[in-house]
Image (spheres, rainbow, N blue to C red):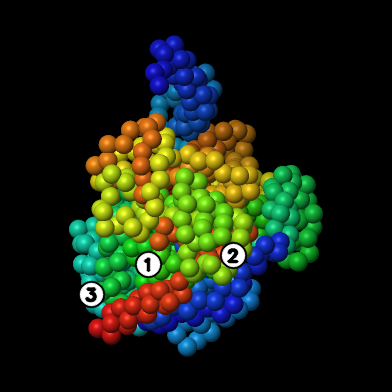
Amino acid sequence: MAAIEMRNIVKEYGDGFKAVNDISLSIADGEFMILVGPSGCGKSTLLRMIVGLEDITSGDMVIGDDRVNEKAPRDRNLSMVFQNYALYPHLTVFENIAFPLRLNKKIGEDEIKRRVNEAADMLELHEHLERKPANLSGGQRQRVAMGRAIVRQVNAFLFDEPLSNLDAKLRGQMRTEISRMQRRLGTTTVYVTHDQTEAMTLGDRVAVLRRGFLQQVASPRELYEQPVNMFVAGFIGSPPMNFLPAVVSGQRLKLPFLETDLPAIASGKVTDGQLLIAGIRPEHFEDARLLDPSKRDRGVTFRAKVDVTEWLGDSQYAYIPFEANEEVTKQLADLAAELDSEALRTQLIISIDAMSRLRENHEGEFWADTSRMHLFDPRTGENLTRDEAAAADLASYEEEELRERTAQ
Amino acid sequence: MKVSRRTQAFWIAGAILIIAYAIIPVLWIISLSFKEGDDITNKSFLPSTWSWENYKTVFASDLFTTALRNSVGMSLIATTISVILATLAAYAISRLDFPGKRLVLGVALAITVFPVIAIATPLFDLWRNIGLYDTWLGLIIPYLSYSLPLSVYVLAAFFREIPWEMEQAAQVDGATAWQAFRRVIVPLATPGVFTAAILTFFAVWNDFVFGITLTSSEAARPVPAALAFFQGASQFSQPTAPIAAAAVVVTIPVVILVLLFQRKIVAGLTNGAVKG
């Protein structure tokens, strides 16, 4: 086990395109680090640079105490689970898992048998040990790939979107399985995904990447509550955060449908009449009729016409279209394109109580928790309302938890 | 998809026609080889009496048995060397990026379209000068240069089918480039290796032009060339029937070889390697 330290890592391709741009990231010993971002953000390239399958253009990659830039993959003592598993089809499950051990001449046959069985126990692969990968289901193949990764004592595990080929139900199961395994073995883990559920649930910390640049490295909670910019705010959360145009007017802020006080934290950073983008998460809205009275004072109520509702049993979403000026619309469309989605129309997506009997195409009264609203500079995307103190608090809490876990 | 009765009948008729076209000459040769003495003029497809006489003649003659030994020996050596070299070369072509890669492939292909007879005469002169004339090596070298390009092509196609990740996984698991090649890539390319081996073996086994031009004695003369020197029971009778018997004998190993290797050429060996 070892810590991984990246200093100013750059990956430049022959045509001058920089897939990874000046990334510095330190991953503590035993930490579960997630690399997340939309496709083409450089997350897989970064992972492949850690393992040594991709050359590093400049910067330092340090694993444990060694700079490994020039080392071949086999000398880095890492193990990796590939997106398509990359099992050896001519070998049985047992031999697949034993493969890394067989390459080491010093390990005896008894030791190999013991270790493979141990890995098979952990992954419940015992009855499949003599089968070939072709006869296994997707989930079983995935477990074999994991078995091959954990059978050695390695410095770190690397996962490259390991669950993206599984169906939704199996993905959920395997996610918990991976989490349990990592907690049990306590091995440093780097996990690449574009699925934010995986990012939020698995990681001690999450690194959000965009076009080769590191945006924010923080605990899932901090990413969610104190994003540094509009990109991170829009990427984390499902359904995504709502972005609304907001105009500063004295100490007040005018949004479509509603008006509220300018948050104190942003007051020094904006000028009168400035156009901002306000971000409010869907779950910070509620049907005013079903609202807990104690909450009412934290936000404001407004009336709006609901376009479509989606009832999911445990929750309910309502869509409220709104008009925005051209500049904001364009900004939001750009952001949506970057997040691999498409902004067809400017609309609010709000999460309301499943009990709400709100009807489509009818006006309703809603409540928005403006105390949890974020304000972004439309030009830079920077978050003007990020609370550094709260963020630091969340970070220290997370660190403590990790320390406690690795100490065991 | 439902195939109509008419189309089915059409396909069956076509298949029978093609099979007949291919197999009748073979059956004829077999029938000839069992005809005794002057029976070859009996104007019927089957021999009047079945006899092993021709086979006895064939195996009794030194000409044939030494030629058979030469053929088997040279074919096996040429095939082995060719397949090993082709595997390495094809791997380099499919996996490595080096300048002149296309040129190498192009030249390799150009060699195969070169008419064999055009190179036979210069080789005859050259081999005589440097002492390779009428030796095994003198035949194995041209065999290699003609069979290698085809093997490289076949194998390069197979290597390209193997997912890159297989090798990368092996590297991460701690394998050297050579270990990854030997323990992962080669086993996966087995069908390709066997295909290349069969093709090479056929080409070498059936060679006549090099065999007749580059040899002068029994030291290296292969079977196809030796058949041309065959003599009948008497000086005045054509040795048609013994030649037919010899032809049958040399066909047998090839048939056995195909049946053996066919099992190895299992399509879809890479099933289950990656998601699917």
| Tag 3 subunit | A
Instruction: Tell me which residue sits at (25%, 83%) in the image.
Output: A408
State the residue lying farthest toward the front. A250
Instruction: Tell me which residue sits at (24%, 42%) in the image.
Output: A355
Q: Name the secondary structure under disc 1.
A: helix
Judging by the rendered image, the residue that carries numbered circle 2 is A270
**Lower position in the chain sequence, tag 2 or tag 1:** 1
State the residue lying farthest toward the bottom. A65
Q: Residues within 10 Å of mark 3 (few under 14, many from 20)?
A: few
| Tag 2 subunit | A
| Mark 3 vs mark 2, CA separation in Å | 65 Å
How many marks do you count on the picture? Answer: 3
Dot 3 and dot 2 within a common chain: yes
Q: Between A341 and A93, which is closer to the camera in this rendering? A: A341
Viewer-side label of 3, 1: 1
- On residue A114, the disc is 3
Viewer-side label of 3, 2: 2
